[in-house]
Protein backbone atom coordinates (compact mmCIF):
# COMPACT_ATOMS: atom_id res chain seq x y z
CA UNK A 1 0.00 0.00 0.00
CA UNK A 2 1.12 3.55 -0.70
CA UNK A 3 0.70 4.39 2.97
CA UNK A 4 3.34 1.88 3.85
CA UNK A 5 6.08 3.63 1.87
CA UNK A 6 8.96 4.36 4.17
CA UNK A 7 8.44 7.60 6.03
CA UNK A 8 4.72 7.96 5.36
CA UNK A 9 3.40 5.66 8.10
CA UNK A 10 1.88 7.27 11.18
CA UNK A 11 0.81 4.10 12.98
CA UNK A 12 2.62 1.46 15.03
CA UNK A 13 1.75 -1.83 16.74
CA UNK A 14 0.13 0.29 19.47
CA UNK A 15 -2.38 1.61 16.94
CA UNK A 16 -5.70 -0.20 17.37
CA UNK A 17 -8.27 -0.76 14.62
CA UNK A 18 -11.73 -2.25 15.12
CA UNK A 19 -13.71 -3.75 12.23
CA UNK A 20 -17.37 -4.73 12.61
CA UNK A 21 -18.93 -7.68 10.75
CA UNK A 22 -15.46 -9.00 10.00
CA UNK A 23 -15.83 -12.78 10.00
CA UNK A 24 -16.05 -12.76 6.19
CA UNK A 25 -16.21 -10.62 3.05
CA UNK A 26 -14.91 -7.06 2.91
CA UNK A 27 -14.64 -6.79 6.71
CA UNK A 28 -12.38 -9.82 6.98
CA UNK A 29 -10.20 -8.47 4.17
CA UNK A 30 -9.93 -5.08 5.89
CA UNK A 31 -8.74 -6.81 9.06
CA UNK A 32 -6.18 -8.71 6.97
CA UNK A 33 -4.87 -5.51 5.33
CA UNK A 34 -4.63 -3.59 8.63
CA UNK A 35 -2.82 -6.48 10.28
CA UNK A 36 -0.46 -6.82 7.30
CA UNK A 37 0.34 -3.13 7.78
CA UNK A 38 1.31 -3.77 11.41
CA UNK A 39 -1.81 -2.31 13.05
CA UNK A 40 -3.22 -4.24 16.03
CA UNK A 41 -6.66 -5.18 14.74
CA UNK A 42 -9.78 -6.37 16.52
CA UNK A 43 -11.90 -8.63 14.35
CA UNK A 44 -15.47 -8.51 15.61
CA UNK A 45 -18.37 -10.74 14.61
CA UNK A 46 -21.85 -11.34 15.95
CA UNK A 47 -21.26 -15.08 15.97
CA UNK A 48 -18.41 -16.17 18.26
CA UNK A 49 -17.61 -19.36 16.35
CA UNK A 50 -17.54 -17.70 12.91
CA UNK A 51 -15.39 -14.89 14.34
CA UNK A 52 -12.89 -17.19 16.04
CA UNK A 53 -12.62 -19.28 12.91
CA UNK A 54 -11.77 -16.13 10.87
CA UNK A 55 -9.11 -15.18 13.43
CA UNK A 56 -7.58 -18.67 13.18
CA UNK A 57 -7.45 -18.26 9.40
CA UNK A 58 -5.54 -14.96 9.69
CA UNK A 59 -3.18 -16.33 12.36
CA UNK A 60 -2.42 -19.27 10.05
CA UNK A 61 -1.42 -16.63 7.46
CA UNK A 62 1.14 -15.35 9.99
CA UNK A 63 -0.91 -12.40 11.27
CA UNK A 64 -0.51 -12.66 15.05
CA UNK A 65 -1.65 -9.05 15.71
CA UNK A 66 -5.36 -9.90 15.36
CA UNK A 67 -7.64 -10.16 18.39
CA UNK A 68 -11.32 -11.10 18.62
CA UNK A 69 -14.46 -9.99 20.42
CA UNK A 70 -18.13 -10.73 19.86
CA UNK A 71 -20.16 -7.77 18.57
CA UNK A 72 -23.76 -7.71 17.36
CA UNK A 73 -24.23 -4.12 16.25
CA UNK A 74 -28.00 -4.05 16.81
CA UNK A 75 -27.74 -5.34 20.40
CA UNK A 76 -26.95 -2.53 22.85
CA UNK A 77 -25.77 -4.95 25.54
CA UNK A 78 -23.31 -6.56 23.12
CA UNK A 79 -22.06 -3.11 22.04
CA UNK A 80 -21.59 -2.01 25.68
CA UNK A 81 -19.79 -5.24 26.60
CA UNK A 82 -17.47 -4.84 23.65
CA UNK A 83 -16.67 -1.21 24.50
CA UNK A 84 -15.93 -2.11 28.13
CA UNK A 85 -13.64 -4.97 27.05
CA UNK A 86 -11.83 -2.78 24.52
CA UNK A 87 -11.27 -0.01 27.04
CA UNK A 88 -9.99 -2.38 29.68
CA UNK A 89 -7.70 -4.33 27.32
CA UNK A 90 -6.41 -1.62 24.96
CA UNK A 91 -7.33 1.68 26.63
CA UNK A 92 -8.99 2.91 23.44
CA UNK A 93 -8.81 2.75 19.66
CA UNK A 94 -7.57 4.76 16.69
CA UNK A 95 -9.54 3.37 13.76
CA UNK A 96 -13.18 2.28 13.64
CA UNK A 97 -14.51 0.58 10.52
CA UNK A 98 -18.31 0.32 10.52
CA UNK A 99 -18.55 -2.49 8.00
CA UNK A 100 -21.31 -4.82 9.27
CA UNK A 101 -24.24 -4.71 6.88
CA UNK A 102 -26.99 -6.69 5.22
CA UNK A 103 -29.70 -6.61 2.55
CA UNK A 104 -33.20 -8.08 2.67
CA UNK A 105 -33.37 -9.75 -0.74
CA UNK A 106 -33.91 -13.17 0.84
CA UNK A 107 -36.79 -12.01 3.12
CA UNK A 108 -40.35 -13.03 2.32
CA UNK A 109 -41.68 -10.54 4.90
CA UNK A 110 -40.63 -7.28 3.24
CA UNK A 111 -41.69 -5.10 6.19
CA UNK A 112 -39.51 -7.08 8.55
CA UNK A 113 -36.71 -7.02 5.98
CA UNK A 114 -36.81 -3.23 5.73
CA UNK A 115 -36.78 -2.86 9.52
CA UNK A 116 -33.83 -5.23 9.91
CA UNK A 117 -31.82 -3.52 7.16
CA UNK A 118 -32.33 -0.06 8.66
CA UNK A 119 -31.52 -1.44 12.13
CA UNK A 120 -28.25 -3.04 11.05
CA UNK A 121 -26.97 -0.61 8.39
CA UNK A 122 -27.97 2.68 10.03
CA UNK A 123 -28.81 2.26 13.72
CA UNK A 124 -26.09 -0.40 14.12
CA UNK A 125 -23.46 2.11 13.01
CA UNK A 126 -24.85 4.72 15.39
CA UNK A 127 -24.89 2.26 18.32
CA UNK A 128 -21.26 1.28 17.87
CA UNK A 129 -20.00 4.77 17.06
CA UNK A 130 -21.70 6.44 20.04
CA UNK A 131 -20.44 3.82 22.47
CA UNK A 132 -16.86 3.93 21.18
CA UNK A 133 -16.52 7.67 20.54
CA UNK A 134 -15.31 8.50 24.06
CA UNK A 135 -12.37 6.11 23.64
CA UNK A 136 -11.35 6.94 20.08
CA UNK A 137 -8.03 8.77 20.39
CA UNK A 138 -7.60 12.27 18.96
CA UNK A 139 -6.74 12.25 15.26
CA UNK A 140 -8.48 8.87 14.92
CA UNK A 141 -10.43 7.72 11.91
CA UNK A 142 -13.95 6.41 11.43
CA UNK A 143 -14.72 4.83 8.07
CA UNK A 144 -18.29 3.82 7.26
CA UNK A 145 -18.75 1.16 4.61
CA UNK A 146 -21.54 2.56 2.46
CA UNK A 147 -22.65 2.06 -1.14
CA UNK A 148 -23.31 3.97 -4.33
CA UNK A 149 -26.85 2.65 -3.95
CA UNK A 150 -27.02 5.26 -1.16
CA UNK A 151 -26.33 8.18 -3.48
CA UNK A 152 -28.99 10.88 -3.46
CA UNK A 153 -29.57 10.50 -7.19
CA UNK A 154 -31.43 7.26 -6.35
CA UNK A 155 -34.19 9.16 -4.55
CA UNK A 156 -37.08 9.76 -6.96
CA UNK A 157 -38.71 12.52 -4.92
CA UNK A 158 -37.39 16.08 -5.05
CA UNK A 159 -38.76 16.76 -1.54
CA UNK A 160 -37.05 13.74 -0.02
CA UNK A 161 -33.81 14.70 -1.75
CA UNK A 162 -34.04 18.25 -0.42
CA UNK A 163 -34.84 17.05 3.11
CA UNK A 164 -31.84 14.76 3.43
CA UNK A 165 -29.36 16.99 1.61
CA UNK A 166 -30.15 20.19 3.48
CA UNK A 167 -26.79 21.30 4.94
CA UNK A 168 -28.62 23.77 7.16
CA UNK A 169 -31.13 21.40 8.78
CA UNK A 170 -29.32 18.06 8.67
CA UNK A 171 -29.22 16.44 12.12
CA UNK A 172 -29.44 13.00 13.66
CA UNK A 173 -33.11 13.62 14.50
CA UNK A 174 -33.82 14.55 10.91
CA UNK A 175 -32.15 11.36 9.64
CA UNK A 176 -34.07 9.24 12.18
CA UNK A 177 -37.34 10.84 10.98
CA UNK A 178 -36.32 10.22 7.37
CA UNK A 179 -35.84 6.47 7.95
CA UNK A 180 -39.05 6.29 10.01
CA UNK A 181 -40.93 7.93 7.14
CA UNK A 182 -39.49 5.29 4.83
CA UNK A 183 -40.55 2.42 7.13
CA UNK A 184 -44.06 3.90 7.27
CA UNK A 185 -44.11 3.98 3.44
CA UNK A 186 -43.07 0.31 3.35
CA UNK A 187 -45.89 -0.58 5.75
CA UNK A 188 -48.40 1.32 3.58
CA UNK A 189 -47.06 -0.24 0.35
CA UNK A 190 -46.13 3.21 -0.97
CA UNK A 191 -42.40 2.90 -1.73
CA UNK A 192 -42.67 3.90 -5.39
CA UNK A 193 -45.62 6.26 -4.90
CA UNK A 194 -43.70 8.37 -2.38
CA UNK A 195 -40.52 8.47 -4.47
CA UNK A 196 -38.23 6.27 -2.39
CA UNK A 197 -35.40 4.59 -4.34
CA UNK A 198 -36.37 1.92 -6.85
CA UNK A 199 -33.11 0.76 -8.35
CA UNK A 200 -33.07 -1.98 -10.95
CA UNK A 201 -30.13 -3.85 -9.42
CA UNK A 202 -28.90 -7.27 -10.57
CA UNK A 203 -32.33 -8.19 -11.93
CA UNK A 204 -34.20 -7.78 -8.61
CA UNK A 205 -37.62 -6.17 -8.18
CA UNK A 206 -36.68 -2.44 -8.05
CA UNK A 207 -38.58 -1.99 -4.76
CA UNK A 208 -36.64 -4.85 -3.18
CA UNK A 209 -33.43 -2.82 -2.87
CA UNK A 210 -35.22 0.28 -1.58
CA UNK A 211 -34.49 -0.43 2.11
CA UNK A 212 -30.80 -1.01 1.42
CA UNK A 213 -30.57 2.27 -0.56
CA UNK A 214 -32.32 4.22 2.21
CA UNK A 215 -30.09 2.68 4.91
CA UNK A 216 -26.98 3.82 3.03
CA UNK A 217 -28.43 7.28 2.25
CA UNK A 218 -28.99 7.61 6.00
CA UNK A 219 -25.48 6.35 6.72
CA UNK A 220 -23.93 8.90 4.38
CA UNK A 221 -25.99 11.67 5.95
CA UNK A 222 -24.95 10.51 9.44
CA UNK A 223 -21.32 10.59 8.29
CA UNK A 224 -21.75 14.27 7.41
CA UNK A 225 -23.45 15.12 10.72
CA UNK A 226 -20.79 13.33 12.74
CA UNK A 227 -17.94 14.91 10.75
CA UNK A 228 -19.35 18.31 11.61
CA UNK A 229 -19.73 17.42 15.31
CA UNK A 230 -16.23 15.94 15.56
CA UNK A 231 -14.44 18.47 13.39
CA UNK A 232 -10.85 18.98 14.54
CA UNK A 233 -10.85 15.84 16.69
CA UNK A 234 -11.53 12.89 14.37
CA UNK A 235 -11.79 12.20 10.64
CA UNK A 236 -14.95 10.44 9.52
CA UNK A 237 -15.78 9.43 5.97
CA UNK A 238 -17.77 6.82 4.09
CA UNK A 239 -16.86 4.83 0.99
CA UNK A 240 -18.34 2.44 -1.54
CA UNK A 241 -16.28 -0.72 -2.07
CA UNK A 242 -17.83 -1.28 -5.50
CA UNK A 243 -19.63 -4.41 -6.64
CA UNK A 244 -17.55 -6.97 -4.75
CA UNK A 245 -17.44 -10.77 -4.76
CA UNK A 246 -18.84 -11.65 -1.31
CA UNK A 247 -21.77 -13.61 0.10
CA UNK A 248 -23.81 -10.41 -0.11
CA UNK A 249 -23.56 -10.46 -3.90
CA UNK A 250 -23.62 -14.27 -4.05
CA UNK A 251 -20.08 -14.01 -5.36
CA UNK A 252 -21.26 -12.12 -8.44
CA UNK A 253 -19.32 -8.87 -7.96
CA UNK A 254 -16.80 -7.52 -10.41
CA UNK A 255 -14.20 -6.77 -7.73
CA UNK A 256 -12.19 -9.07 -5.49
CA UNK A 257 -12.44 -8.46 -1.72
CA UNK A 258 -8.88 -7.13 -1.88
CA UNK A 259 -10.01 -4.45 -4.31
CA UNK A 260 -13.26 -3.82 -2.41
CA UNK A 261 -11.43 -3.23 0.88
CA UNK A 262 -8.72 -1.03 -0.63
CA UNK A 263 -10.30 2.45 -0.43
CA UNK A 264 -11.44 1.94 3.18
CA UNK A 265 -8.01 0.86 4.38
CA UNK A 266 -6.37 3.67 2.40
CA UNK A 267 -8.70 6.26 3.99
CA UNK A 268 -8.06 4.94 7.49
CA UNK A 269 -4.28 4.94 7.06
CA UNK A 270 -3.82 8.25 5.22
CA UNK A 271 -0.89 10.13 6.76
CA UNK A 272 -1.88 13.28 8.69
CA UNK A 273 0.03 15.34 6.09
CA UNK A 274 -1.95 13.96 3.15
CA UNK A 275 -4.05 16.45 1.22
CA UNK A 276 -6.57 13.61 0.72
CA UNK A 277 -7.21 13.54 4.48
CA UNK A 278 -10.61 15.13 4.97
CA UNK A 279 -13.85 14.56 6.87
CA UNK A 280 -17.53 14.16 6.02
CA UNK A 281 -16.89 12.96 2.47
CA UNK A 282 -17.90 9.95 0.37
CA UNK A 283 -15.25 7.98 -1.55
CA UNK A 284 -14.90 5.32 -4.25
CA UNK A 285 -11.66 4.02 -5.76
CA UNK A 286 -9.55 6.38 -3.60
CA UNK A 287 -11.36 9.49 -4.89
CA UNK A 288 -14.24 11.65 -3.63
CA UNK A 289 -17.58 10.86 -5.24
CA UNK A 290 -20.92 12.70 -4.91
CA UNK A 291 -23.28 11.94 -2.01
N1 LIG B 1 -20.30 -6.68 -1.66
C1 LIG B 1 -20.64 -5.56 -2.30
O1 LIG B 1 -20.72 -5.51 -3.54
C2 LIG B 1 -20.89 -4.30 -1.51
C3 LIG B 1 -21.10 -3.12 -2.23
C4 LIG B 1 -21.33 -1.94 -1.54
C5 LIG B 1 -21.33 -1.96 -0.17
N2 LIG B 1 -21.13 -3.13 0.52
C6 LIG B 1 -21.12 -3.07 1.97
O2 LIG B 1 -19.95 -3.68 2.46
C7 LIG B 1 -20.16 -4.17 3.78
C8 LIG B 1 -19.68 -5.60 3.87
O3 LIG B 1 -20.44 -6.39 3.00
P1 LIG B 1 -19.93 -7.73 2.33
O4 LIG B 1 -20.15 -7.60 0.87
O5 LIG B 1 -18.59 -8.08 2.85
O6 LIG B 1 -21.05 -8.73 2.86
P2 LIG B 1 -20.99 -10.12 3.64
O7 LIG B 1 -19.93 -10.99 3.08
O8 LIG B 1 -22.39 -10.58 3.64
O9 LIG B 1 -20.53 -9.70 5.11
C9 LIG B 1 -21.37 -8.96 5.95
C10 LIG B 1 -20.82 -9.05 7.34
O10 LIG B 1 -21.63 -8.24 8.20
C11 LIG B 1 -22.01 -9.04 9.31
N3 LIG B 1 -23.26 -8.55 9.91
C12 LIG B 1 -24.46 -8.40 9.33
N4 LIG B 1 -25.35 -7.94 10.22
C13 LIG B 1 -24.67 -7.79 11.41
C14 LIG B 1 -25.03 -7.37 12.70
N5 LIG B 1 -26.28 -7.00 12.97
N6 LIG B 1 -24.08 -7.32 13.67
C15 LIG B 1 -22.81 -7.68 13.39
N7 LIG B 1 -22.41 -8.13 12.18
C16 LIG B 1 -23.34 -8.18 11.21
C17 LIG B 1 -22.12 -10.45 8.76
O11 LIG B 1 -22.12 -11.41 9.81
P3 LIG B 1 -22.70 -12.90 9.61
O12 LIG B 1 -21.67 -13.67 8.85
O13 LIG B 1 -22.88 -13.36 11.02
O14 LIG B 1 -23.99 -12.78 8.84
C18 LIG B 1 -20.86 -10.46 7.91
O15 LIG B 1 -19.74 -10.67 8.71
C19 LIG B 1 -21.66 -4.00 4.04
O16 LIG B 1 -21.87 -2.85 4.81
C20 LIG B 1 -22.24 -3.82 2.65
O17 LIG B 1 -23.45 -3.11 2.66
C21 LIG B 1 -20.91 -4.29 -0.13
Image (cartoon, grey):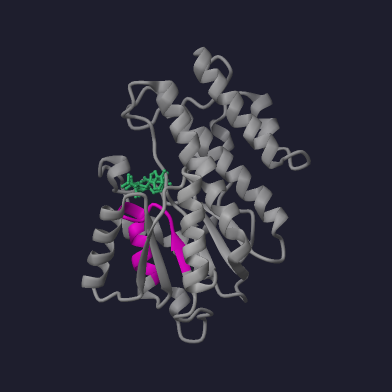
Q: Residue 43 at what x, y percent from top left?
A: 37, 62
| Quadrant of residue 116 within the rendered picture | top left
User: As displayed, is residue 202 above or below residue 33?
Assistant: above
User: As displayed, is residue 231 above or below residue 213?
Assistant: below
State which quarter of the image contains the C terminus: top right
Residue 266 belongs to magenta span = no
Residue 32 belongs to magenta span = yes
Q: Residue 143 at what x, y percent from top left?
A: 52, 57
User: As displayed, is residue 2 above or below residue 289?
Assistant: below
Depth order, front residue of 94/199: 94
Query: What residue appears at the point 62 percent right and 45 percent down from the top-left corner?
Result: 222
Depth order, front residue of 196/74: 74
Seen in the image, is 258 located left or right of residue 231?
Answer: left
Q: Which residue range is magenta in the image?
A: 17-34
User: Can you see residue 277?
Assistant: yes
Q: Residue 35 at what x, y percent from top left?
A: 37, 72
Disc count in the image? 0
Query: What residue appears at the point 59 percent right and 27 percent down from the top-left corner?
Result: 180
Q: Residue 93 at what x, y percent from top left?
A: 53, 68
Amino acid sequence: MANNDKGSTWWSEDTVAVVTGANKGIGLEMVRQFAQNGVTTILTARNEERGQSAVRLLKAEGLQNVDFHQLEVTDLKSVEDFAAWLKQRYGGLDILINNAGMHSLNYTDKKQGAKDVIDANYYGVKNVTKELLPVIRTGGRIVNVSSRLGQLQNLNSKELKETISSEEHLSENLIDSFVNEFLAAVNKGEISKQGWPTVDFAGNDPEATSDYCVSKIALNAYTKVLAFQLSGRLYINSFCPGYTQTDMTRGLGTKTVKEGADTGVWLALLPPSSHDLTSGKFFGERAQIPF
